[in-house]
Image: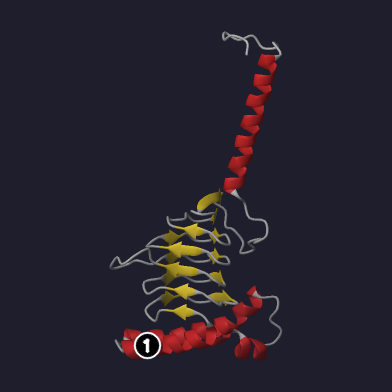
Amino acid sequence: MLKEDIKVVFEQDPAARSTMEVVLTYSGLHAIWAHRVAHSFYKRKQFFLARSISQISRFFTGIEIHPAAKIGRRFFIDHGMGVVIGETCDIGNNVTIFQGVTLGGTGKEKGKRHPTIKDNALIATGAKVLGSITIGENSKVGAGSVVLHDVPANSTVVGIPGKVVIQDGVKIKKDLDHCNLPDPVADRFKELEQEIQGLQNELKQLKEGKIKSGYPTI
């Protein structure tokens, strides 16, 4: 499993140059390894020891993973500073997340209160996924998005609150272009601008008498 963790770093990060560099300097990898140790103690009900390991890891890596969180294989945290993963999170296999991501709750509710992230999902820089919701397989969450509802499989969600902008039923490659995300708010503004322009043109024609209307001439 350690070899698998190192291999996924080379697959996901073009800056990785050597195994020694990855093992000694990648904080995301250190946080994952520390979490596995903490999680094993948590399952044995040694909660204080598990939590202590989690907090020591947080101090050195800047990544906070609750020891109760369930994390699958080939999980990759890129850079990682500011990442928070809550107690009841359930993360599948081949998941990638970037710095500043929060997988958190929405209040003081009991039971399952953190997200479930399915296999092959990607969550981009600064995204907040909150509550007991599910991010479907092969889906992407754009940078800075705030997701409060379930995301279907094979989808891309962006914005605040997050909106699904792509869903074609085809597996999406993990190559999210952070600089060219769809913007549903800007698209709607453009539509409104076009509608206003059309109304202005129609009003101008009415004033010039080019369009007959049942209303008196302005």
> Is residue 1 in view from this perspective?
no
x%, y% of residue 48? 33, 89
Nearest the eye: 172 or 99: 99
- 201 shown above or below 148: above
Q: In the displayed structure, does residue 116 sit left or right of residue 82?
A: left
- 32 shown above or below 204: below
Nearest the eye: 201 or 171: 201
Q: Dividing the image into 4 quarters, which one contains the C terminus? A: top right
x%, y% of residue 67? 39, 81
The residue positioned 61% from the left and 89% from the top of the image is: 23
x%, y% of residue 195? 62, 30
Mark 1 crowdedness (10 Å alpha carbons): few <14, some 14-19, many ≥20: many
Residue annotated with mark 1: 50
* Amino acid at the residue labelled 1: Ala
> Is residue 41 in view from this perspective?
yes
Q: In the displayed structure, does residue 206 sit left or right of residue 142?
A: right
- Badge count: 1
The residue positioned 53% from the left and 84% from the top of the image is: 61
Nearest the eye: 25 or 136: 25
